[in-house]
Image (cartoon, rainbow, N blue to C red):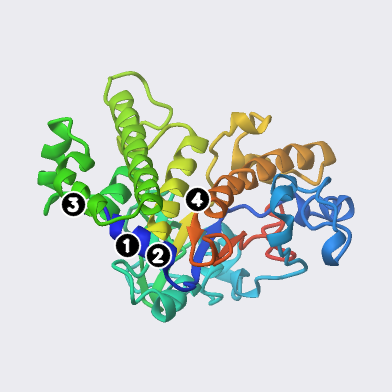
Amino acid sequence: MVPARRALAATAAGRKVRLVAIEMVHGSAGSTAIGIKKNLWAPAAIGGEFDLGPTSLVSLEPFRDYLTIVSNTDVRNAEAFTAPEIGGDHFRSSAVFLTQVHPKQTQGSDVHAGTSLDQIYAKAFGQETAIPSIQLCVENVDQAGGCSYGYSCTYTDSISWASATQPLPMTRDPRTVFDQLFGVGATPQERAERRAEDRSILDWLGTATRRLKKELGAADRTRLAAYLDEVREIERRIQRVESKNSSGEPRDLPEAPVGVPDSFSEHVKLMFDLQALAFASDITRVFAFKLGRDASNRVYPESGFKGAFHSASHHGEREDRIMDYQKINSYHVSMVPYLLEKLKNTPDGDGTLLDNSLVMYGSPMGDSNLHNHKRVP
């Protein structure tokens, strides 16, 4: 059911710590030799007087008081350790992002990495919630077996590992996430029947919601109404996406599930909205979110550059191409303030969700043109 009572309890309760770990692949323009000189990622100044102007982080300016930029960091365990591993950087890097363990080179089911940070966090802080952690992605291939350079596709598709041998699947479809958080119906078939009847999840909860409202004061009724409105609005947006993608019109992402928007920004915002709601209602306190897939050639026209992602990352050390690649980096980072603003505007204990959350953003690769893992963003 919609956990509205927990949403109100979370507002009044004590401090709860939360984690969002966001990975973007292919490193950054700021990790190149030219990018370092131009401060395309890390600002020139240290301390609190840094200038975000030249960097890909400029969209985070409204949140600079919350911001910590970690620079000059290498991800040694994503490098090749043996000759057969050379060239396989794109196909092992994501497995290292939150584990910091060198993955075993295998195309079989005997994968091996390490327990990821989000799962360590979930074991420490997520056991009191209905769902200890949730894993999301924007792209994946979701296939068994090998991908390339002798590495299992598992390493490319997941950043979250419950143990050294147990990678966790990342969910791409916002509908699946919505039903996991708020779905009415014991089975997928029952939930599909509710949607076929064009009934909102809130229609199923009308009696319980009315009863809860009678128990609340004016301020809590206002918060409850805002929470339920947000749930319904997200539900409508998902329904609009499903309707459009089921219309028979050509899709930009024909292989994607019907609930996945073709628009990158729309997809990311839906996922961020679901994360913020889950935090507000204390359904979970841990999210791992994979914004891209290594070697992806997706195009991001809203970035101002129409070239393909992977191809753009292989810039050949040309300054003009590095600056084009920075446009993609900047666009990706510009998605994050949407989540931060949602968290900042949501009360939590004596502060806000943003006050009580750690939001990480980074990449396990540095200069993708060189396939290195030095000075990672």
Looking at marks 4 and 1 on the same chain, the residue that comes earlier in the sequence is marked by 1
- Label 2: state its secondary structure: helix
- Is 297 left or right of 329, judged from the image as shown? left
Residue assigned mark 3: 211
Classify residue 124 by image quadrant: bottom left
How far apart marks 3 and 4 lie (CA) works out to 46 Å
Residue 122 falls in image quadrant:
bottom left
Viewer-proximal residue, 26 or 73?
73
Q: How many marks?
A: 4
| Amino acid, disc 1 | Arg
Foreground tag (3 vs 1)? 3
- Cα–Cα span, label 3 and label 1: 15 Å
Label placed on residue 157: none
Residue under circle 4?
293
Q: Relative to 17, is 193 on the left or the right? A: left
In percent of the image, x 49 and y 73: which residue is there? 15
Say if residue 139 shows up in the picture: no
Residue at 42% x, 66% y is 12
